[in-house]
Image (cartoon, rainbow, N blue to C red):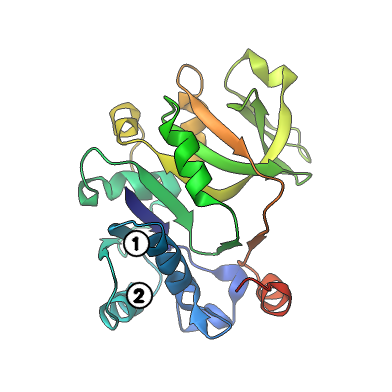
């Protein structure tokens, strides 16, 4: 299968660390975040990885070029315009191996989750996308019923996006930043420019199968803040 690492973010919550380097090259226990995700994908047997870049894109390209990898790594250059997650996926379309699923992983997510199980679950379904989620009490949540995406809610403001009537029977979950998409999804993308992949999923979930696989057992941490980065360095014994 293909791999894609979302690494184009500005990393504003990691300042001053990202004043001179991109978020993807922030170090955790002596190793850049980007390298950790590449190694994880290589260990899964992925032979082609696409990395999207924007902030200090030249430094990411230089880092990738400086090492010998056990896979092909292609750059999707968004240095002109930051395209968000959905736009980034669409922009990289021609870089993927045709007909192969795409494992997508945010560069700033640390986890010991079983991605092989996620791959198997997606392969055994007819889903356009399978999102790894966990129970959440945060303000912004997805809503899920019978493993299917039904909507989104901001529980603080009350803003709601409903994909189908099962929304009213749903539970709240948080998206982990790990997902698999089928190549067929490109047939159904009508958004252009910069757009959120979650907003795209919410639209597709009205009549397509967008699956959410619940994982409350694994460790997950968003490394997008200095506080969490320091906490991960101190507490994550699987690094």
- Where does the image place residue 14, in percent across and percent down from the top left? 60, 74
Instruction: Please report contact status of discs 1 and 2: CB closer than 8 Å, yes or no.
Output: yes
Q: Which mark is residue 31?
A: none
- Where does the image place residue 24, in percent across and percent down from the top left? 46, 71
- Where does the image place residue 34, in percent across and percent down from the top left? 44, 70
- Which residue in the structure is indicated by mark 1? 51
Q: Which mark is residue 60?
A: 2
Whether 156 is drawn above or below 50: the answer is: above
Whether 227 is drawn above or below 192: the answer is: below
* Residue 195 appears in the rendering: no
Decide: few, some or many residues near mark 2? Use Cα within 10 Å; few <14, some 14-19, many ≥20.
many
- Where does the image place residue 202, in percent across and percent down from the top left? 52, 29
Q: Answer left or right for 22 relative to 214.
A: left
Q: CA distance from mark 1 to mark 2?
A: 9 Å
* Residue 101 appears in the rendering: yes
**In percent of the image, x 36 and y 45: which residue is there?**
102
- Nearer to us in this view, 46 or 24: 46
The count of marks equals 2
Q: Residue 39 occupies which quadrant of the picture?
A: bottom left
Q: Secondary structure at mark 1?
A: strand
Q: Secondary structure at mark 2?
A: helix
**In percent of the image, x 47 and y 71: which residue is there?**
36
**In percent of the image, x 53 and y 40: which residue is there?**
131
Decide: few, some or many residues near mark 1? Use Cα within 10 Å; few <14, some 14-19, many ≥20.
many
Dot 1 or dot 2: first in sequence order is: 1
């Amino acid at each position: 299968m293909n791999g894609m690492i979302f690494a184009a973010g500005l990393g504003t919550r990691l300042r001053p660390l990202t004043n001179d380097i991109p978020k993807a090259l922030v170090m955790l226990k002596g190793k850049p975040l980007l390298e950790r995700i590449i190694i994880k994908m290589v260990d899964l047997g992925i032979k082609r990885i696409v990395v999207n870049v924007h902030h200090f894109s030249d430094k990411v390209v230089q880092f990738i070029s400086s090492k010998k990898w056990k896979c092909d790594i292609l750059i999707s250059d968004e240095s002109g315009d930051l395209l968000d997650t959905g736009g980034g996926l669409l922009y990289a379309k021609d870089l993927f191996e045709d007909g192969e699923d795409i494992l997508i992983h945010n560069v700033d997510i640390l986890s010991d989750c079983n991605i092989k199980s996620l791959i198997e679950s997606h392969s055994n379904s007819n889903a356009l996308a399978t999102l790894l989620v966990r129970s959440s009490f945060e303000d912004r949540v997805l809503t899920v019923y019978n493993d299917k995406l039904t909507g989104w809610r901001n529980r603080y403001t009350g803003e709601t996006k409903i994909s189908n009537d099962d929304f009213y029977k749903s539970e709240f979950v948080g998206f982990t930043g790990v997902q698999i998409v089928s190549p067929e999804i490109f047939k159904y993308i009508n958004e252009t420019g910069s757009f959120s992949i979650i907003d795209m999923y919410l639209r597709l979930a009205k009549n397509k199968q967008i699956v959410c696989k619940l994982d409350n057992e694994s460790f997950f941490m968003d490394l997008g803040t200095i506080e969490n980065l320091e906490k991960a360095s101190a507490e994550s014994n699987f690094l």
